[in-house]
Amino acid sequence: MTHFHDATTCQSCDQRFTSVFCKAKQEFIAEINEQKVCNVYKKGQTLFNEGSYPFGVYCINEGKVKLSHLGDDGKEQIIRLLRGGDVLGYRALLSGERYSASAIVLEDTQVCFIPKELFISVLKNDAGLAFEMMKLLSDELHKAEVKLTHLAQKPIRERLAETLLFIKETYGYEADGITLNVRLSREEIANLVGTATESTIRLLSEFKKDGMVELEGKKIKILRQKELIRTANLQD
Amino acid sequence: MTHFHDATTCQSCDQRFTSVFCKAKQEFIAEINEQKVCNVYKKGQTLFNEGSYPFGVYCINEGKVKLSHLGDDGKEQIIRLLRGGDVLGYRALLSGERYSASAIVLEDTQVCFIPKELFISVLKNDAGLAFEMMKLLSDELHKAEVKLTHLAQKPIRERLAETLLFIKETYGYEADGITLNVRLSREEIANLVGTATESTIRLLSEFKKDGMVELEGKKIKILRQKELIRTANLQD
DNA sequence: CCTAAAACATGACAAAAATCATGTATAAGG
DNA sequence: CCTTATACATGATTTTTGTCATGTTTTAGG
């Protein structure tokens, strides 16, 4: 875990126009820039663990992170996928609770840590940022509620198709324009869909047989997006 | 829909210590009190509909409201149950989107409406309230994520038991101390659990046979809460 | 009070999905 | 490079859940 204080400044960060912080006042951004601590995490490493107390928030500069819950029987449920520009760890911090999910790095990821006190004080003094934060929370809540409805009402085939599209929306394609730009195990995909690993494997094979996707180890290529959308049966 | 402007003032409202607004500055509460419009809605009436644009937020003074989504195939999914002191309609307003859910009154309910502009301006000028709002959003997000995990991982029997406990947490018991203080149809319970109505009916009968609940039309009495908790298989 | 509609209940059946078992491929470590 | 563990794959089977059918009860409205 390499440690560096100012490899990037918030003022020159690639994500400065996309993250929530973009609406913060300049003076606060300067302060955040001074106090932040940046780290690089390797694949499989943990930013924080479910059950522990938050000390601040994490801002992803570059990389990919999964946020997952452990179900009562120990099964992982992936509740969010994060990328550069995304902030995480704010939920527990705002509620004043322990983390309810773990953040695990999917590939080498550069992250800035912003201490709790600073984050809270900036939020309390910068109405613009607070408002952006509320919007972000609202959006997350909306997404969670839609996901909830689909989980309750849609068959697994549709949910898997939807999940593939969601992965594409989140991480996009590689240079070839068709390969999903992330490597997830079948088990992780299953934990995203909310199903058994075998079901996911089976359905992916079916999608392949139907010519919608191509599978090459963990590489997934989307061959017919339209058909995938149709399979997902999305109205909204 | 009876119309009255100041049947209750925010300063004397029963909910003034429990709602999010309790942390707002006095001056803003006074302003809200002036601009608010109160109404009484009858059972089955709609506060707002999925797909329409928000004009403000609703603050429940007394009564019960369900917030539900329509799934892609038209099936209702109840995503929240609300009671006195709860605020609703803020999600769409903050995201600047149409309502993603409908709010339908479960029994005669008294509601105050606070216009959009006022709500936003108060939020932007009252950091304390903004912070409370963020906490509320965080809590909702947390609940949604837990529900998501359970929906993905738990069998219907456990989810029904959990739902009954959830209803009890939300609306409590009647004077007798065992009857759930709300009347929901079997279909509504099913739409809360995320299952078919018949499955809910069947399982409720089983719960009755097992002596955990007593059923009397729409009245549900919890006879053995501990066993219900065990049935729900809750660890958290 | 009567009638129609809606809600509730239950059995039979079908479909969906999970689990179990087993084998193969792939990746990681000595 | 070989060995071992892990991930992937697929068939068989069981369990869970949904759907359909049908009857009964309750509720709402005239």
Image: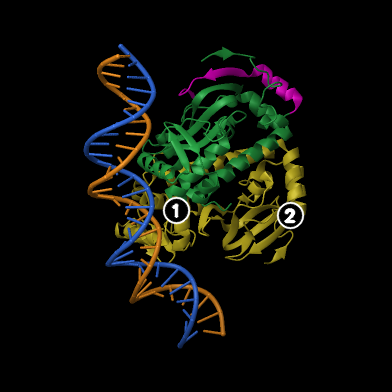
Chain colours: A green, B yellow, C blue, D orange
Residue B215 screen position, x and y as percent: 38, 63
Residue A130 screen position, x and y as percent: 69, 35
- A178 above or below A60? below
Query: Could you say which quadrant of the image residue A73 lies in?
Result: top left
Q: Which residue is mark 2?
A: B36
| Three-letter code, disc 2 | Lys
Query: Could you say which quadrant of the image residue B196 lies in?
Result: bottom left
Of A19 and B1, nearer the camera is A19
Q: Quadrant of the N terminus of chain B?
A: bottom right
- A180 above or below C9? above
* Residue A33 sits inside the magenta stretch: yes
Q: Secondary structure at mark 1?
A: helix
| Three-letter code, disc 1 | Val
* Mark 1 nearby-residue class (10 Å; few <14, some 14–19, many ≥20): many
Residue A75 screen position, x and y as percent: 38, 37
Residue B193 badge: 1
Q: Are marks 1 and 2 on the same chain?
A: yes
Q: What's the CA distance linking mark 1 and mark 2?
A: 35 Å
- In the image, the segment drawn in magenta is A25-47
In the rendered structure, the residue with mark 2 lies on which chain?
A: B
- Closer to us: mark 1 or mark 2? 1
Q: Quick check: A89 left or right of A209?
A: right
Residue drawn at x 73%, y 34% as measured from the top left: A128
Residue C11 screen position, x and y as percent: 27, 67
* Residue B52 sits inside the magenta stretch: no
